[in-house]
Image: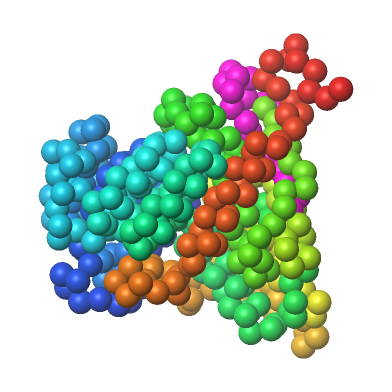
């Protein structure tokens, strides 16, 4: 795994199979984003068997098949959708197309696991909710910056154990390395990727709901900007937002595409979680200037100060739990309510955002 390549960031964990051979075959439709590799890694390590792939681009399929030489290359989406042996379809296609594909997947009796953002419009979320209620099938979303980061998972475990008391405020940062010359055209079109708060902001909002135990939240204020990417007039390279949860917890997050080349990884993602009896800082991908390894967590409470190095020590329980949820009709990995609420809030933050620095310099951002 190349730590400098965020688009193809694909963590690998220990194999911890929750099902036996042949119990959970799954397929892939859509290879537009490299997160599909991490999604497949997690499912395979939990016992899922990747059996088939389809994408209209032969070059993408060839590269993917080289990593999974035993899978079958399907000739169409329909070939996968109509295969009754396949339990789930995973996808990292263009974000605006993820909702429509999911509807087709569930209509064919299969569970769905898609990259974030799973939707770019609230109408897509509503259609997905209706389809889940109609079919009883699962619609999972790969919120990787919590689900596939051991320090972020451990933070949640500490909170559940009461290590910092009641969580009252969270600060999240999600900086990313741009590398625009390697990005596809859809990456710069907000109609396709949803905008910066909908896209990489989705990670932040999901972890806020999880760490605070909130069921809902209100977007109080949000901003977006194109500060330094004027060659892409519709693109947003900065965004931030403030939210208030239904349980009184508050949240501020910032996402951006300004990670400098000198950083040893693709983004210095962090979370600072304040509780009534202590606080936690999660340094997900690097501890700058001190340690280039990932998964550092700092805990301060009434018992003192602790530093944890967590790579290889926590694992990624979401994937096994999600497979079992699909098979058993349970909701242990993530409830559908939580899944869809995070998706809805990131769209609301995007829709309400003030544009403080439009790409067109002739536009006055604020009156």
Seen from this angle, which residue lies furthest front? 134
Please tell me which residue is depicted at 81% across the width and 77% down the height of the picture: 276
Please tell me which residue is depicted at 73% across the width and 63% down the height of the picture: 246
Query: Is residue 283 within the magenta segment?
Result: no
Region rendered in magenta? 227-243
The picture places residue 193, in percent across and down from the top left corner, at 50, 35
Residue 132 as seen in the image, left or right of residue 169? left
Query: Is residue 240 within the magenta segment?
Result: yes
The picture places residue 265, in percent across and down from the top left corner, at 54, 50
Q: Nearer the viewer, residue 316 or 113?
A: 113
Seen from this angle, which residue lies furthest top? 362
Please tell me which residue is depicted at 23% across the width and 67% down the height of the picture: 24
Please tell me which residue is depicted at 33% across the width and 68% down the height of the picture: 326
Is residue 332 at least partly visible in the picture?
yes
Q: How is the image coloured?
A: rainbow
Overall secondary structure of the magenta stretch? Answer: loop
The picture places residue 43, in percent across and down from the top left corner, at 32, 64
Vertical order, 66 against 13 (above or below): above
Vertical order, 283 against 241 (above or below): below
Vertical order, 67 against 23 (above or below): above
**Snapshot quadrant of residue 112:** bottom left
The quadrant of the rendering that contains the N terminus is bottom left
Vertical order, 59 against 175 (above or below): above
């Amino acid at each position: 795994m190349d730590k400098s390549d965020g688009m193809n960031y694909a963590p690998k964990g220990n194999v911890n199979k929750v099902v036996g051979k042949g119990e959970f075959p799954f397929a892939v439709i859509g290879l537009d984003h490299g997160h599909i590799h991490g999604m497949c890694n997690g499912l395979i390590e939990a016992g899922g068997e990747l059996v088939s792939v389809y994408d209209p681009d032969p070059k993408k399929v060839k590269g993917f098949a080289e990593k999974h030489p035993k899978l079958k290359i399907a000739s169409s989406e329909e070939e996968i959708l109509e295969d009754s042996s396949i339990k789930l379809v995973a996808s990292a296609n263009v974000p605006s197309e993820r909702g429509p594909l999911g509807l087709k997947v569930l209509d064919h009796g299969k569970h769905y696991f898609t990259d974030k953002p799973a939707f770019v419009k609230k109408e897509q979320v509503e259609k997905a909710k209706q389809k889940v209620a109609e079919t009883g099938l699962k619609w999972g979303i790969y919120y990787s910056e919590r689900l596939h980061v051991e320090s972020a998972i451990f933070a949640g475990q500490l909170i559940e154990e009461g290590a910092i008391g009641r969580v009252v405020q969270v600060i999240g940062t999600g900086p990313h390395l741009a590398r625009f010359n390697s990005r596809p055209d859809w990456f710069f079109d907000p109609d396709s990727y949803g905008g910066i708060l909908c896209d990489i902001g989705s990670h932040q909002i999901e972890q806020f709901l999880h760490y605070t135990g909130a069921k809902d939240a209100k977007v109080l204020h949000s901003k977006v900007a194109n500060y330094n990417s004027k060659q892409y007039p519709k693109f947003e390279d900065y965004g931030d937002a403030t939210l208030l949860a239904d349980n009184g917890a508050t949240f501020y997050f910032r996402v951006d595409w300004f990670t400098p080349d000198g950083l040893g990884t693709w983004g210095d993602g962090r979370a600072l979680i304040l509780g009534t009896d202590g606080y936690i800082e999660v340094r997900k991908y690097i501890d700058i200037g001190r340690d280039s390894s990932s998964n550092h967590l700092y805990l301060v409470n009434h018992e003192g100060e602790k530093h944890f190095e967590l790579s290889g020590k926590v694992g990624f329980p979401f994937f096994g739990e999600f497979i079992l949820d699909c098979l058993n009709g349970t909701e242990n990995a993530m409830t559908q309510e939580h899944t869809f609420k995070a998706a809805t809030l990131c769209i609301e933050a995007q829709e309400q955002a003030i544009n403080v620095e439009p790409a067109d310099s002739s536009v006055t951002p604020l009156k």
